[in-house]
């Protein structure tokens, strides 16, 4: 049970990254519909994968930044 508690940060990180990727894919879909262009599912998959990796990198960078002491 201790190992699950220690890995809780991993599940939170993956959840945040998945939500960010879903938002990016939804925005890309809405932009394509507004421009009245057909959207390719492969392109949306690439956008989702790039958003997922970008969110993971952003979380890592934010986690490495020390908080200021007041």
Image (cartoon, helix red, strand yellow):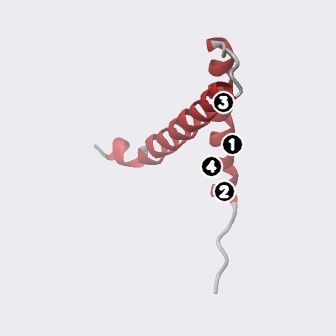
- Secondary structure under the numbered disc 3 in the rendered image: helix
Q: Give the mark, 2 or 3, whose residue is nearer the N terminus.
A: 3
Q: Which residue is mark 2?
A: 62
- Residue drawn where x is 32% and y is 46% of the image: 2
Q: Quadrant of residue 24?
A: top right
Write down the residue under mark 4.
59
Q: Are marks 2 and 4 in contact (CB under 8 Å)?
A: yes
Foreground: disc 2 or disc 3: 3
Q: CA distance from mark 2 to mark 4?
A: 5 Å
Residue drawn 61% across and 13% down? Answer: 41
Element type where label 1 sits in the image: helix
Q: Residues within 10 Å of mark 1 (few under 14, many from 20)?
A: few
The answer to which of marks 2 and 1 sits earlier in the sequence is 1
User: Residue 18's spot in the image, x, y percent?
Assistant: 52, 35
Q: Residue furthest left?
A: 1
Camera-near label (1 vs 3) is: 3
Contact flag, marks 2 and 1 (Cβ < 8 Å): no
Earlier-in-chain disc, 4 versus 3: 3
Residue 27 picture location, percent across and down: 61, 35
Measured Cα–Cα span from mark 2 to mark 1: 9 Å
Q: Nearer the viewer, residue 51 or 58?
A: 51
Separation (CA) of disc 4 from disc 1: 5 Å
Q: Is residue 4 left or right of residue 35?
A: left
Q: Quadrant of residue 25?
A: top right
- Marks 1 and 3 close (CB-CB < 8 Å): no
Q: Which residue is mark 3?
A: 34
């Amino acid at each position: 049970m201790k190992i699950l508690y220690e890995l809780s940060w991993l599940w939170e990180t993956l959840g945040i990254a998945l939500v960010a990727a879903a938002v990016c894919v939804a925005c890309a879909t809405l932009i394509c519909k507004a421009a009245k262009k057909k959207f390719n599912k492969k392109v949306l998959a690439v956008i989702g994968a790039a958003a997922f990796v970008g969110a993971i990198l952003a979380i890592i960078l934010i986690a490495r930044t020390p908080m200021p002491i007041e």
